[in-house]
Amino acid sequence: MKKMMTYSEGIREGMSAAMRKDPDVVLFGEDVGMFGGCFGVSAGMFDEFGPERVRDTPISESAIIGCAVGAASTGLRPIAEIMMMDFLTVAMDQMCNNAAKLRFMTGGALHFPMVIRTAGGAGVNAAAQHSQSLEAWVTHVPGLKMVFPSNAQDAYGLMLSAVADDNPVVYEEHKAMLAMESEVDLDEGPIPLGVGKVVRPGSDVTIVAVGNMVHQALAAAETLEKDGIDCEIIDPRTLYPFDFDMVANSIDKTHKAIVVSEEVKRGGYMGEISAQISENLFDSLDAPVVRIGALNTPVPFSPALEPIYLPNAEDIVKAVRSQG
Protein backbone atom coordinates (compact mmCIF):
# COMPACT_ATOMS: atom_id res chain seq x y z
CA MET A 1 0.00 0.00 0.00
CA LYS A 2 1.39 3.38 -1.04
CA LYS A 3 0.50 6.68 0.58
CA MET A 4 1.95 10.13 1.06
CA MET A 5 3.56 10.60 4.44
CA THR A 6 5.67 13.18 6.19
CA TYR A 7 9.07 12.17 7.50
CA SER A 8 7.55 12.31 10.99
CA GLU A 9 4.70 10.00 9.99
CA GLY A 10 7.17 7.54 8.45
CA ILE A 11 8.96 7.29 11.79
CA ARG A 12 5.68 6.84 13.66
CA GLU A 13 4.38 4.22 11.25
CA GLY A 14 7.64 2.27 11.60
CA MET A 15 7.36 2.28 15.40
CA SER A 16 3.66 1.42 15.35
CA ALA A 17 4.13 -1.43 12.87
CA ALA A 18 6.88 -2.90 15.05
CA MET A 19 4.70 -2.61 18.16
CA ARG A 20 1.71 -4.23 16.46
CA LYS A 21 3.89 -7.15 15.42
CA ASP A 22 5.75 -7.68 18.69
CA PRO A 23 4.24 -7.07 22.15
CA ASP A 24 7.76 -6.82 23.61
CA VAL A 25 8.38 -3.53 21.79
CA VAL A 26 7.80 -0.54 24.08
CA LEU A 27 8.29 3.21 23.72
CA PHE A 28 9.31 5.60 26.46
CA GLY A 29 10.81 9.05 26.86
CA GLU A 30 9.96 12.59 27.85
CA ASP A 31 6.40 13.53 26.80
CA VAL A 32 6.03 10.67 24.31
CA GLY A 33 2.67 9.59 25.82
CA MET A 34 -0.55 11.59 25.70
CA PHE A 35 1.34 14.69 24.50
CA GLY A 36 2.68 12.75 21.51
CA GLY A 37 6.31 13.80 21.79
CA CYS A 38 8.06 17.16 21.57
CA PHE A 39 7.65 17.18 17.77
CA GLY A 40 4.44 15.13 17.64
CA VAL A 41 6.19 12.05 16.24
CA SER A 42 4.47 9.63 18.62
CA ALA A 43 1.03 11.29 18.39
CA GLY A 44 -1.76 8.75 18.78
CA MET A 45 0.47 5.90 19.93
CA PHE A 46 -0.56 6.27 23.57
CA ASP A 47 -4.20 5.79 22.55
CA GLU A 48 -3.40 2.72 20.45
CA PHE A 49 -0.96 0.91 22.72
CA GLY A 50 -1.83 2.23 26.18
CA PRO A 51 0.19 3.45 29.14
CA GLU A 52 1.97 0.12 29.71
CA ARG A 53 3.73 0.29 26.35
CA VAL A 54 3.97 4.05 25.72
CA ARG A 55 5.35 5.69 28.84
CA ASP A 56 6.44 9.15 29.86
CA THR A 57 9.66 9.36 31.85
CA PRO A 58 11.28 11.86 34.19
CA ILE A 59 13.55 14.50 32.64
CA SER A 60 16.68 12.37 33.06
CA GLU A 61 18.37 11.18 29.89
CA SER A 62 20.75 8.95 31.81
CA ALA A 63 17.81 7.26 33.50
CA ILE A 64 16.00 6.83 30.16
CA ILE A 65 18.94 5.02 28.54
CA GLY A 66 19.72 3.09 31.72
CA CYS A 67 16.12 1.89 31.77
CA ALA A 68 16.40 0.86 28.12
CA VAL A 69 19.58 -1.13 28.83
CA GLY A 70 17.89 -2.97 31.68
CA ALA A 71 14.69 -3.57 29.74
CA ALA A 72 16.58 -4.89 26.71
CA SER A 73 18.64 -7.25 28.85
CA THR A 74 15.46 -8.89 30.15
CA GLY A 75 13.88 -9.52 26.73
CA LEU A 76 12.00 -6.34 25.86
CA ARG A 77 12.76 -4.29 22.76
CA PRO A 78 12.62 -0.70 24.00
CA ILE A 79 12.52 2.41 21.83
CA ALA A 80 13.92 5.15 24.05
CA GLU A 81 13.49 8.74 22.93
CA ILE A 82 16.11 11.35 23.76
CA MET A 83 14.34 14.55 22.78
CA MET A 84 17.37 16.35 21.27
CA MET A 85 20.63 14.87 20.05
CA ASP A 86 22.45 17.41 22.22
CA PHE A 87 21.04 15.60 25.25
CA LEU A 88 22.93 12.42 24.39
CA THR A 89 25.76 14.11 26.24
CA VAL A 90 23.83 13.56 29.48
CA ALA A 91 23.33 9.87 28.65
CA MET A 92 26.85 9.10 27.40
CA ASP A 93 27.80 6.85 30.31
CA GLN A 94 24.78 4.58 29.90
CA MET A 95 24.98 4.65 26.10
CA CYS A 96 28.73 4.20 25.60
CA ASN A 97 29.80 2.25 28.70
CA ASN A 98 26.77 0.02 29.17
CA ALA A 99 24.58 -0.29 26.07
CA ALA A 100 27.53 -0.45 23.67
CA LYS A 101 29.72 -2.82 25.68
CA LEU A 102 27.69 -5.24 27.78
CA ARG A 103 26.97 -7.75 25.01
CA PHE A 104 30.71 -7.99 24.38
CA MET A 105 31.55 -8.14 28.09
CA THR A 106 29.03 -10.94 28.71
CA GLY A 107 30.42 -12.98 25.84
CA GLY A 108 27.15 -12.69 23.98
CA ALA A 109 25.14 -14.16 26.84
CA LEU A 110 23.00 -11.03 26.93
CA HIS A 111 21.55 -9.14 23.98
CA PHE A 112 20.58 -5.48 24.02
CA PRO A 113 17.94 -4.93 21.32
CA MET A 114 17.21 -1.25 21.91
CA VAL A 115 16.65 1.82 19.74
CA ILE A 116 17.71 5.29 20.88
CA ARG A 117 15.67 7.83 18.91
CA THR A 118 16.97 11.37 18.91
CA ALA A 119 16.39 14.56 16.89
CA GLY A 120 19.50 16.20 15.49
CA GLY A 121 20.37 18.96 13.09
CA ALA A 122 19.93 22.70 12.73
CA GLY A 123 17.81 24.94 10.54
CA VAL A 124 14.90 25.58 12.88
CA ASN A 125 16.46 28.33 15.05
CA ALA A 126 16.71 26.09 18.11
CA ALA A 127 20.09 27.56 19.15
CA ALA A 128 23.39 26.05 20.23
CA GLN A 129 22.16 23.51 22.79
CA HIS A 130 19.34 22.07 20.66
CA SER A 131 20.76 21.94 17.12
CA GLN A 132 23.91 19.85 17.06
CA SER A 133 24.83 17.01 14.73
CA LEU A 134 26.90 14.59 16.81
CA GLU A 135 27.12 11.63 14.45
CA ALA A 136 30.88 11.34 14.94
CA TRP A 137 30.45 10.89 18.70
CA VAL A 138 28.10 7.94 18.17
CA THR A 139 29.91 6.24 15.28
CA HIS A 140 33.20 6.37 17.18
CA VAL A 141 31.94 3.89 19.80
CA PRO A 142 32.22 0.15 18.98
CA GLY A 143 29.00 -1.65 19.85
CA LEU A 144 26.64 1.04 18.60
CA LYS A 145 24.93 1.08 15.23
CA MET A 146 23.55 4.28 13.75
CA VAL A 147 20.95 5.11 11.13
CA PHE A 148 19.98 8.48 9.66
CA PRO A 149 17.06 8.42 7.19
CA SER A 150 16.58 11.29 4.74
CA ASN A 151 12.97 10.62 3.68
CA ALA A 152 9.74 9.04 4.93
CA GLN A 153 10.25 5.68 3.16
CA ASP A 154 13.66 5.21 4.72
CA ALA A 155 12.40 6.47 8.07
CA TYR A 156 9.79 3.70 8.01
CA GLY A 157 12.00 0.88 6.74
CA LEU A 158 15.02 1.70 8.86
CA MET A 159 12.89 1.85 12.01
CA LEU A 160 11.64 -1.68 11.36
CA SER A 161 15.20 -2.94 11.02
CA ALA A 162 16.47 -0.95 13.99
CA VAL A 163 13.81 -2.43 16.29
CA ALA A 164 14.50 -5.96 15.01
CA ASP A 165 18.26 -5.70 15.54
CA ASP A 166 19.73 -7.40 18.61
CA ASN A 167 22.19 -4.54 19.19
CA PRO A 168 21.77 -0.93 20.33
CA VAL A 169 20.86 1.29 17.37
CA VAL A 170 20.94 5.08 17.51
CA TYR A 171 18.25 6.42 15.19
CA GLU A 172 18.74 10.06 14.25
CA GLU A 173 15.83 12.15 13.01
CA HIS A 174 16.42 15.56 11.45
CA LYS A 175 14.21 18.28 12.92
CA ALA A 176 14.11 20.32 9.71
CA MET A 177 12.75 17.34 7.73
CA LEU A 178 9.90 16.29 10.02
CA ALA A 179 7.22 17.92 7.83
CA MET A 180 8.83 16.91 4.53
CA GLU A 181 6.40 14.73 2.55
CA SER A 182 7.06 11.87 0.15
CA GLU A 183 5.48 8.62 -1.00
CA VAL A 184 5.84 5.57 1.23
CA ASP A 185 5.19 1.99 0.18
CA LEU A 186 4.23 0.22 3.41
CA ASP A 187 4.60 -3.16 1.69
CA GLU A 188 8.34 -2.69 1.12
CA GLY A 189 9.11 -3.58 4.72
CA PRO A 190 12.46 -3.31 6.52
CA ILE A 191 15.52 -1.70 4.92
CA PRO A 192 18.60 -3.73 5.91
CA LEU A 193 21.12 -1.86 8.03
CA GLY A 194 24.34 -1.19 6.15
CA VAL A 195 22.76 -0.84 2.71
CA GLY A 196 23.00 2.59 1.09
CA LYS A 197 20.99 4.02 -1.79
CA VAL A 198 21.91 5.70 -5.06
CA VAL A 199 19.54 8.66 -4.85
CA ARG A 200 20.61 10.07 -8.20
CA PRO A 201 22.72 8.14 -10.73
CA GLY A 202 25.48 10.07 -12.47
CA SER A 203 28.84 9.72 -14.18
CA ASP A 204 31.06 12.71 -13.37
CA VAL A 205 31.33 13.04 -9.58
CA THR A 206 30.22 11.08 -6.52
CA ILE A 207 28.54 13.03 -3.73
CA VAL A 208 28.10 11.14 -0.45
CA ALA A 209 25.52 13.01 1.64
CA VAL A 210 23.60 12.21 4.82
CA GLY A 211 20.36 13.46 6.38
CA ASN A 212 19.14 16.83 5.21
CA MET A 213 22.28 17.27 3.13
CA VAL A 214 20.90 14.70 0.68
CA HIS A 215 18.35 17.30 -0.37
CA GLN A 216 21.00 20.01 -0.62
CA ALA A 217 23.04 17.67 -2.82
CA LEU A 218 20.03 17.08 -5.09
CA ALA A 219 19.56 20.84 -5.44
CA ALA A 220 23.26 21.24 -6.27
CA ALA A 221 23.02 18.48 -8.86
CA GLU A 222 20.23 20.33 -10.65
CA THR A 223 22.42 23.45 -10.87
CA LEU A 224 25.46 21.50 -12.06
CA GLU A 225 23.42 19.62 -14.66
CA LYS A 226 22.95 22.91 -16.49
CA ASP A 227 26.75 23.03 -16.90
CA GLY A 228 26.85 19.47 -18.20
CA ILE A 229 28.14 17.99 -14.92
CA ASP A 230 26.40 14.73 -14.02
CA CYS A 231 26.41 14.07 -10.26
CA GLU A 232 25.85 10.69 -8.63
CA ILE A 233 24.40 11.10 -5.13
CA ILE A 234 24.71 8.36 -2.54
CA ASP A 235 22.76 8.32 0.72
CA PRO A 236 24.41 5.81 3.10
CA ARG A 237 21.23 5.72 5.22
CA THR A 238 23.15 3.72 7.82
CA LEU A 239 26.25 5.47 9.14
CA TYR A 240 27.42 2.31 10.88
CA PRO A 241 27.56 -0.25 9.42
CA PHE A 242 28.53 1.82 6.38
CA ASP A 243 27.99 0.71 2.77
CA PHE A 244 31.50 1.42 1.54
CA ASP A 245 31.13 -0.96 -1.42
CA MET A 246 28.43 1.28 -2.89
CA VAL A 247 30.70 4.30 -2.54
CA ALA A 248 33.64 2.43 -4.05
CA ASN A 249 31.63 1.27 -7.06
CA SER A 250 30.51 4.84 -7.68
CA ILE A 251 34.00 6.34 -7.43
CA ASP A 252 35.39 3.66 -9.75
CA LYS A 253 32.99 5.17 -12.29
CA THR A 254 33.25 8.90 -11.54
CA HIS A 255 36.83 9.17 -10.16
CA LYS A 256 35.86 12.15 -7.97
CA ALA A 257 34.33 12.35 -4.49
CA ILE A 258 32.59 14.95 -2.34
CA VAL A 259 31.44 14.04 1.18
CA VAL A 260 28.97 16.31 2.94
CA SER A 261 27.20 16.34 6.28
CA GLU A 262 25.77 18.90 8.67
CA GLU A 263 28.34 18.12 11.35
CA VAL A 264 31.01 20.66 12.24
CA LYS A 265 33.67 19.86 9.64
CA ARG A 266 36.47 19.43 12.20
CA GLY A 267 36.35 15.87 13.44
CA GLY A 268 33.10 15.00 11.66
CA TYR A 269 32.22 11.45 10.61
CA MET A 270 32.54 12.46 6.97
CA GLY A 271 36.26 12.85 7.68
CA GLU A 272 36.32 9.12 8.43
CA ILE A 273 34.59 8.35 5.14
CA SER A 274 37.00 10.66 3.33
CA ALA A 275 39.93 8.81 4.90
CA GLN A 276 38.53 5.44 3.87
CA ILE A 277 38.13 6.66 0.30
CA SER A 278 41.67 8.06 0.22
CA GLU A 279 43.22 4.95 1.77
CA ASN A 280 41.38 2.38 -0.32
CA LEU A 281 40.54 4.12 -3.60
CA PHE A 282 43.53 6.38 -4.17
CA ASP A 283 44.27 4.99 -7.63
CA SER A 284 40.67 5.59 -8.69
CA LEU A 285 40.71 9.31 -7.79
CA ASP A 286 41.44 12.07 -10.30
CA ALA A 287 41.24 14.74 -7.59
CA PRO A 288 41.46 14.95 -3.78
CA VAL A 289 38.36 14.09 -1.78
CA VAL A 290 36.54 17.25 -0.67
CA ARG A 291 34.80 17.42 2.72
CA ILE A 292 31.92 19.81 3.35
CA GLY A 293 30.58 20.50 6.83
CA ALA A 294 29.30 23.22 9.12
CA LEU A 295 31.46 26.07 10.40
CA ASN A 296 33.61 25.55 13.49
CA THR A 297 31.32 27.39 15.88
CA PRO A 298 28.32 26.64 18.11
CA VAL A 299 25.07 26.76 16.16
CA PRO A 300 23.83 30.37 16.16
CA PHE A 301 20.24 31.14 17.15
CA SER A 302 20.02 34.17 14.85
CA PRO A 303 17.85 33.51 11.77
CA ALA A 304 20.36 35.61 9.81
CA LEU A 305 23.42 33.67 11.00
CA GLU A 306 22.19 30.07 11.10
CA PRO A 307 22.05 29.70 7.29
CA ILE A 308 25.64 30.96 7.09
CA TYR A 309 26.70 28.32 9.62
CA LEU A 310 25.09 25.47 7.68
CA PRO A 311 26.49 23.86 4.52
CA ASN A 312 24.21 24.22 1.53
CA ALA A 313 23.75 23.47 -2.15
CA GLU A 314 25.96 26.40 -3.17
CA ASP A 315 28.84 24.99 -1.12
CA ILE A 316 28.45 21.66 -2.90
CA VAL A 317 28.37 23.32 -6.32
CA LYS A 318 31.61 25.19 -5.52
CA ALA A 319 33.27 22.01 -4.29
CA VAL A 320 32.37 20.08 -7.43
CA ARG A 321 33.60 22.86 -9.70
CA SER A 322 36.86 23.07 -7.73
CA GLN A 323 37.68 19.51 -8.79
CA GLY A 324 37.84 20.56 -12.41
Image (cartoon, rainbow, N blue to C red):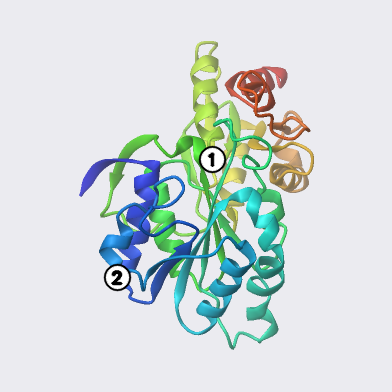
Give the image quarter of residue 76.
Answer: bottom left
Q: Within 10 Å of the Cα at label 1, are there few (<14), some (14-19), or many (20+) other Cα atoms? A: many
Query: Residue at label 2?
Result: 21
Q: Tell which circle, 1 or 2, labels the residue nearer the N-terminal end.
A: 2
Q: Please identify the quadrant where the C terminus is shown.
A: top right
Farthest front residue? 58
> In the rendered structure, which amino acid carries the disc numbered 2?
Lys
Left or right: residue 218 versus residue 263 is: left
Q: CA distance from mark 1 to mark 2?
A: 28 Å
Specify whether residue 139 is in view.
Answer: no
Q: Is residue 243 above or below residue 301?
A: below
Q: Within 10 Å of the Cα at label 2, are there few (<14), some (14-19), or many (20+) other Cα atoms? A: few
Identify the element where label 1 is drawn. Answer: loop
Horizontal and vertical percent position of residue 228: 53, 14
Q: Residue shown at 70%/46% (left/top)?
A: 269
Badge count? 2
Q: Is residue 43 above or below residue 183?
A: below
> In the rendered structure, which amino acid carries the disc numbered 1?
Gly
Pick the residue in front: 44 or 164: 44
Horizontal and vertical percent position of residue 63: 60, 69
Query: Residue at label 1?
Result: 211
